Image (cartoon, helix red, strand yellow):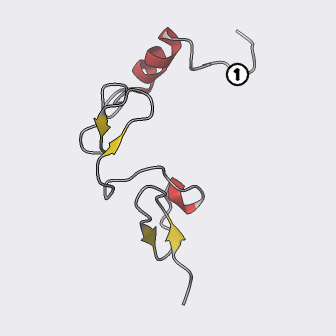
Amino acid sequence: MTNPILACRGCGATKPEPDGTPTDLFTSLHCGDCPPWTCDDCGQTCSMQEPCQCWIVLDGMSIADIKAVFAADGTFNTNPEGGR
């Protein structure tokens, strides 16, 4: 018998074995099983099904559009080596 892998720090959800997702290595702060929580940034109620207004939903966007979203506010360095 193996030890379960902690997949979520918010609700304590575990999984019995690695499944190829990022939570194999790093626990998530929240997951779809978590009850709604108060966002640390904006103070609104937040959940995985209904994110608060400060979340940026990237589902269905192309990679180029995602880069543009983050490049617009300077938080996403699309060229980490500094070259052009």
1, 42: nearer the viewer: 42
Residue 39 lies, with reference to residue 32, above or below; the image says above
Residue holding disc 1 = 80
Give the image location of residue 55, x and y in percent. 37, 29
Quadrant for the C terminus, please.
top right
The residue depicted at 29 percent of the width and 47 percent of the height is: 36
21, 50: nearer the viewer: 50
Give the image location of residue 25, x and y in percent. 60, 59
The residue under label 1 is which amino acid type? Pro
The residue depicted at 25 percent of the width and 44 percent of the height is: 49
Give the image location of residue 65, x and y in percent. 40, 19
Quadrant of residue 45 in the image? top left
The residue depicted at 56 percent of the width and 81 percent of the height is: 3
| Residue density around tag 1, few if under 14, some if 14–19, many if 20 or more, within 10 Å | few
Q: Residue furthest bottom?
A: 1
The residue depicted at 44 percent of the width and 20 percent of the height is: 64
Give the image location of residue 47, x and y in percent. 30, 44
Q: Is residue 53 left or right of residue 83?
A: left
62, 56: nearer the viewer: 56
43, 75: nearer the viewer: 43
Residue 15 lies, with reference to residue 44, above or below; the image says below
Q: How many marks?
A: 1
Quadrant of residue 11 in the image? bottom left
Quadrant for the N terminus, please.
bottom right
Residue 57 lies, with reference to residue 22, above or below; the image says above
- SS for callout 1: loop
